[in-house]
């Protein structure tokens, strides 16, 4: 019998140690791997981190408090956390060719909050303190502090509308960013469904925001960051880009020139677990004038850093600096194009009629007469995991939606190529063509559905065949 691989030995040993304390958790960890091995993962914001990245998180670095930054901590004994954080930041600077990187954010929301507060500190708080002849907020009288506090809270932000594919953390009211900033949104052209830069400029000139946010979680096209920076400069705004979804495409040099956000924005945020294929977490990259403010992220808006996750970020960033990552990024985009082409050839309607990045937004209401919620559930029955997503001017609202968002980073990690993407398009089309809304008391349901003629079973077995050809973590056997 063949010797187990090092990864198999490590994971088996870890699960057995955990099971001695709580078998429910050990079983759930193993169960999650089983689930992920049974489903074709098309969630655009998910991926599969490498075993090295995953293993870097399971250790005693987690036990250390390290508020502050490298060499300036509020706790003693941070020698090795400093090594970890400095290494992760160095790799991030190198990968994205940026002067400064902050690797502590625990998530995308956190990274965005660090960025917003850095811009507010640089553009509002610091000039306010200078005006009042003070060095620190603690030196201000209660009356002066109240004035500065109101000024900090009275700033404006321009961001992409949610229904055009923007993100809740870009100034929308249910999120802290929307309570902090007076926000206005730019949308997409109703005909082409593409971003209209002239309209962004018109809004910016009229609204005069402090910050313009570019970036999306459901827009299937590239953004012209050079054009966005020109608009920001014209109105005196700071350009912030949230590249969480497409950071892997920036790292892999698919988005270059006008389309590389790091070349054009003063500050860029990202998560590390999407197309970048790292651990769950965030990064902030910025120009030198914002660095000192970004570095105050903890304890300004972040709890103590997660040293074990920073270690895993460093491992993933080291992987992303390898030439094979650029090849991976190219294949993500080629696969999304093949998936889009395969769906359109079968008669489906896609928002913007195509894709230029890692995602495809399928209009399931127009194409198949179902809601996003019904499509998402029917596809899961067919062994395909996706998420429902609003489309521009969505008649079904944000809960049921009219769209399903499909992304290729995860399946590309498994090694599927353009030929397999056409097969995936066939599976999706097969399931959704057989799906109809079920009847409810007040007309057709928006949630209940039926899949006719064994289409879901047929899809599930074809998905299983594909997954057997392109296994997840082949080096791990539980
Ligand atoms: N939840 C992420 C996504 O799925 O796009 C964004 O926050």
Image (cartoon, rainbow, N blue to C red):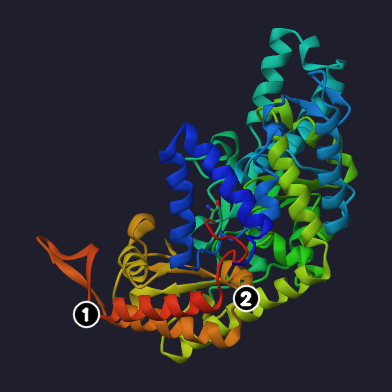
The quarter of the displayed image where residue 462 is located: bottom left
Residue in the foreground of this view, choosing between 277 and 57? 57
The quarter of the picture where the N terminus appears is bottom right
Q: Residue at x 70, y 38 (%)?
A: 308
Residue at disc 1, secondary structure: loop
Q: Position of residue 178 (x, y in %)?
A: 55, 40
Q: Position of residue 194 (x, y in %)?
A: 58, 73
Q: Earlier in the sequence, mark 2 or mark 1?
A: 2
Real-space CA distance between mark 2 and mark 1, rounded to the nearest whole angstrom? 31 Å
Residue at disc 2, secondary structure: loop
Report the number of numbered marks. Answer: 2
Q: In the drawing, what numbered circle is on residue 452? A: 1
Q: Position of residue 29 (x, y in %)?
A: 48, 48
Q: Residue at x 45, y 80 (%)?
A: 465
Q: Position of residue 366 (x, y in %)?
A: 35, 78
Disc 2 residue crowd, few under 14, some 14–19, many 20+, Cα 10 Å: some
Residue in the foreground of this view, choosing between 374 and 257? 374
Q: Is residue 67 visible?
A: yes
Residue for badge 2: 415
Above or below residue 213? Residue 423 is below
Residue in the foreground of this view, choosing between 341 and 430? 430
Q: In the drawing, what numbered circle is on residue 323? A: none
- Is the residue indicated by label 2 positioned so its CB lies within 8 Å of ligand 1? no
Find the residue positioned furthest to the left: 441
Find the residue positioned furthest to the top: 141
Left/right placement of residue 136 relative to residue 426 reads: right
Q: Are marks 2 and 1 in contact (CB under 8 Å)?
A: no
Left/right placement of residue 334 relative to residue 471 reads: right
Q: Residue at x 67, y 70 (%)?
A: 222
Ligand 1 shown in quarter: bottom right
Q: Residue at x 87, y 17 (%)?
A: 135
């Amino acid at each position: 019998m063949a010797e187990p691989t090092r990864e198999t030995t490590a994971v088996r040993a870890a699960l057995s140690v955990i099971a001695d304390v709580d078998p429910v958790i050990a079983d759930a960890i193993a169960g999650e791997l089983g689930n992920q091995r049974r489903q074709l993962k098309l969630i655009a914001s998910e991926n599969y981190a490498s075993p090295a990245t995953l293993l870097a998180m399971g250790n005693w670095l987690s036990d250390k408090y390290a508020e502050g930054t490298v060499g300036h901590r509020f706790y003693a004994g941070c020698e090795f956390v400093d090594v970890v954080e400095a290494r992760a930041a160095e790799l991030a600077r190198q990968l994205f060719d940026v002067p400064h990187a902050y690797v502590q954010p625990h998530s995308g929301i956190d990274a965005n909050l660090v960025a917003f507060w850095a811009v507010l500190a640089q553009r509002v708080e610091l000039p306010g303190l200078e005006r009042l002849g003070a060095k620190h907020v603690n030196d201000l009288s209660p009356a002066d502090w109240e004035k500065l506090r109101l000024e900090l809270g009275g700033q404006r932000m321009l961001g992409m509308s949610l229904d055009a594919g923007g993100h809740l953390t870009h100034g929308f009211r249910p999120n802290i960013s929307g309570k902090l900033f007076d926000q206005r949104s730019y949308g997409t052209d109703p005909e082409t469904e593409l971003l209209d830069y002239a309209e962004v400029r018109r809004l910016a000139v009229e609204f005069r925001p402090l910050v313009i946010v570019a970036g999306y979680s459901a827009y299937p096209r590239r953004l012209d960051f050079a054009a966005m920076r020109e608009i920001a400069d014209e109105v005196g705004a700071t350009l912030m880009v949230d590249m969480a979804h497409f950071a892997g495409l920036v790292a892999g040099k698919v988005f270059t020139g006008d389309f590389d956000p790091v070349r054009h924005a003063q500050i860029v945020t990202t998560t590390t677990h999407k197309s970048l294929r790292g651990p769950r977490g965030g990064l902030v990259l910025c120009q030198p004038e914002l660095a000192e403010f970004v570095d105050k992220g903890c304890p300004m808006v972040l709890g103590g850093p997660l040293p074990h996750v920073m270690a895993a970020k460093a491992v993933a960033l080291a992987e992303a600096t390898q030439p094979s990552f650029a090849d991976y990024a190219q294949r993500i985009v080629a696969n999304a194009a093949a998936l889009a082409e395969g769906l359109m050839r079968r008669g489906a309607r896609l928002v913007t009629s195509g894709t230029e990045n890692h995602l495809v937004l399928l209009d399931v209401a127009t194409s198949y007469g179902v809601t996003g919620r019904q499509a998402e559930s029917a596809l899961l029955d067919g062994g395909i995991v996706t998420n429902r997503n609003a489309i521009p001017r969505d008649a079904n609202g944000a809960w049921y939606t009219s769209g399903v968002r499909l992304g290729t980073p995860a399946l590309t990690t498994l090694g599927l190529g353009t030929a397999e993407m056409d097969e995936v398009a066939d599976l999706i089309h097969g399931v959704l063509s057989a799906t109809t809304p079920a009847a409810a008391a007040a007309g057709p349901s928006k949630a209940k559905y039926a899949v006719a003629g064994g289409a879901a079973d047929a899809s599930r077995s074809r998905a299983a065949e594909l997954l057997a050809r392109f296994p997840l973590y082949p080096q791990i056997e539980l």
